[in-house]
Image: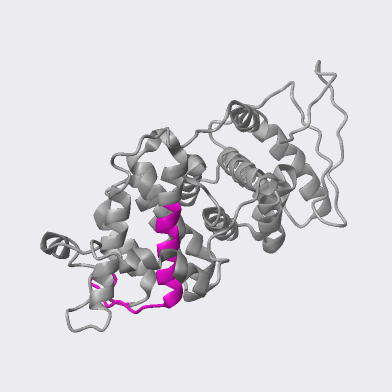
Amino acid sequence: MNNELFTSICNGDIQNSILLSTKILFLNDSIETLEIVYIDICSYIGTFISLLEISKLIDIYSSTKLIIEQDKIVIKDIYILITKMCILCDIYNKHPRSKCGNMSILTLKNKIQPLFDNSEMKLSNNGIIRFEGVIPPYDNENYSISLKIIAIIIKTIKLTDDISVDDSDKLCEISNNIRLVIDYILRKKYKFETKFYSSDNDTTWFIWGIFSILYEDNVFNDAFFLYNYEYKKKYRTKRLGLIWSLGIISIYIHKKDVSKNWSTKEQIVINKMDEISINLYNEIRKDIIKDNPQLSEKNIKNYVEKNDGLDFIINYIPIVNIPITSQTTVHNKNITSDDTNPRIISY
């Protein structure tokens, strides 16, 4: 069911993703499974997100981190997070673009080789001192390449200093170049012995170290938190999108006005989910209990009590008719209220 949920969100299917998330939450009696799926989705979006929409992914990073850190399970927050994720995935599905990580290593090398050949891409003595914590020892075989990588990232970012936010194409090109550099470095699998992460010489920690020194910004902290959460070696590949997104975020920090916030239409969908989340939750809960009698009312009640701050929308019951599984369907309900035209959540 975890893979089914991942696929459903990637497909931009808000209703089915909410149904699956709620069912996983009840049947597993835990939110940990959902947390891993949501981090995987954050990484997936990071493979294709552009500078023009990076502020939306930054919002999703923050929301995901908040859900993980919360002591209580707040259904409203989970449903809104799913909605935001589905919106971005839906945008990509309708207007697909090249994903980071899909390019052959040879093509990738040819694209970024001019940066490595540029003699001006050097790190100053002050720069070497500043990045001492992530640069390997002088006698390490990758000492020189580490200096070159840091210099390329810094000087490429500085190219945006004199570029107006109106020249979005140029800014997008620069941000994507940084992402390609990161992709190349990670795929070369250099080994960097650093003070930043002394227990592991994987290139990923070297990259994280560079951006942690360059920026003291919550968005980088959020991204690192998600990458490092319950980290296991097997998660590395699935979470590379979080690292690739750092190249886009670094340009956003300097040129925030170039990125679009949630559009009016998107915000309407998000606000509507906020409005109806408790009703939707109750409808799904009834069907889960009916199809899974082993779930006691006591257990169900525990989840309801954790929905602090949700107001029950008396006159609004959404129609839901998306299958939870191949055997189970949430049917339309008879509604006793003044609302004779109940609406369907859709995007």
**Residue plotted at (21% across, 64% down):** 122
Q: In this image, 320 relative to 68: left or right?
A: right
Q: Which residues are magenta?
A: 175-199
- x, y percentage for residue 342? 81, 25
Q: Quadrant of residue 167?
A: top left
In this image, 36 relative to 153: left or right?
right
- Residue 228 visible from this viewpoint: no
- Give 273 or 29, whichever is nearer the viewer: 273
| Residue 216 percent coordinates (x, y) | 27, 48
Q: Is residue 31 visible?
A: yes
Question: Is residue 195 magenta-colored?
Answer: yes
Residue sitting farthest toward the top: 338
Q: Is residue 286 left or right of residue 63?
A: right
* Depicted 158 relative to depicted 117: above or below: above
Q: Nearer the viewer, residue 148 or 64?
A: 148
Taking the spot 67% from the left edge, 62% from the top edge, the residue there is 2
